[in-house]
Image (cartoon, rainbow, N blue to C red):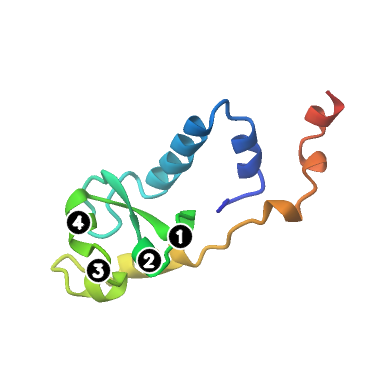
């Protein structure tokens, strides 16, 4: 869910859950330059690479910026099977998507939070 050990800290400092969610979603768009991960057009939504229908999660590594057209066309199909059939299919993009899906997440419970933010503990 988190890309680096500082990510959980920034979410802890957010004022509201709504702002935390907005920042989380925006970081995904920015990682893909606000472009659809499939066709390269402007992204207007986040697609669940493994659809929720197929027990896909809403973790960062399962969300991909997508244009509305690609998101709607893919629906609950398996990403790779659907993407290979598209006229704009690109092996490099498929490799990047797979890499995105396999990125490691950080277990925030594995870190001693007080050592990461001593100024907050010292108060």
Is disc 1 surrounded by few (<14), some (14 to 19) or many (20+) residues within 10 Å?
Answer: some
Q: Which residue is mark 4?
A: 72
Is disc 3 surrounded by few (<14), some (14 to 19) or many (20+) residues within 10 Å?
Answer: some
Tag 3 near tag 2, CB within 8 Å: no
Q: Quadrant of the C terminus?
A: top right
Q: Earlier in the sequence, mark 3 or mark 4?
A: 4
Q: Which residue is mark 2?
A: 50
Residue at 81% across, 39% down: 114
At mark 4, the secondary structure is: helix
Residue at 86% across, 27% down: 122
Q: Quadrant of residue 74?
A: bottom left
**Could you give the CA–CA distance between mark 3 and mark 2, rounded to whole angstroms?**
19 Å
Total marks placed: 4
Residue 62 place in picture, x, y as percent:
43, 60
Residue at 30% across, 69% down: 79
Residue at the right extreme, as displayed: 122
**Could you give the CA–CA distance between mark 1 and mark 2, rounded to whole angstroms?**
8 Å
Q: Nearer the viewer, mark 3 or mark 4?
A: 4
Residue at 49% across, 55% down: 59
Please indicate whether residue 82 sits to the left or right of residue 10 in the image.
left
**Could you give the CA–CA distance between mark 1 and mark 3, rounded to whole angstroms?**
25 Å
Q: Which residue is mark 3?
A: 90
Q: Which residue is mark 1?
A: 57
Tag 1 near tag 2, CB within 8 Å: yes
Q: Nearer the viewer, mark 1 or mark 3?
A: 1
Q: Earlier in the sequence, mark 4 or mark 2?
A: 2
**Could you give the CA–CA distance between mark 3 and mark 4, rounded to whole angstroms?**
19 Å
**Could you give the CA–CA distance between mark 1 and mark 4, rounded to whole angstroms?**
18 Å
Q: Earlier in the sequence, mark 1 or mark 4?
A: 1
Please indicate whether residue 8 sits to the left or right of residue 42 in the image.
right
């Amino acid at each position: 869910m988190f890309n680096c050990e500082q990510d959980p800290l920034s979410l802890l400092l957010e004022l509201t859950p709504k702002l935390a969610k907005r920042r989380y979603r925006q970081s995904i768009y920015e990682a893909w330059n606000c472009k659809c991960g499939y066709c390269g057009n402007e992204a207007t939504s986040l697609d669940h690479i493994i659809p929720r229908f197929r027990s896909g999660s809403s973790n960062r590594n399962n969300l991909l910026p997508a244009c509305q057209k690609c998101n709607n066309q893919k629906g609950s199909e398996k990403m790779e099977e659907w993407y290979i059939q598209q006229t704009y299919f690109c092996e490099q993009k498929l490799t990047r998507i797979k890499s995105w899906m396999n990125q490691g997440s950080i277990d925030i419970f594995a870190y001693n939070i007080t050592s990461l933010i001593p100024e907050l503990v010292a108060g």
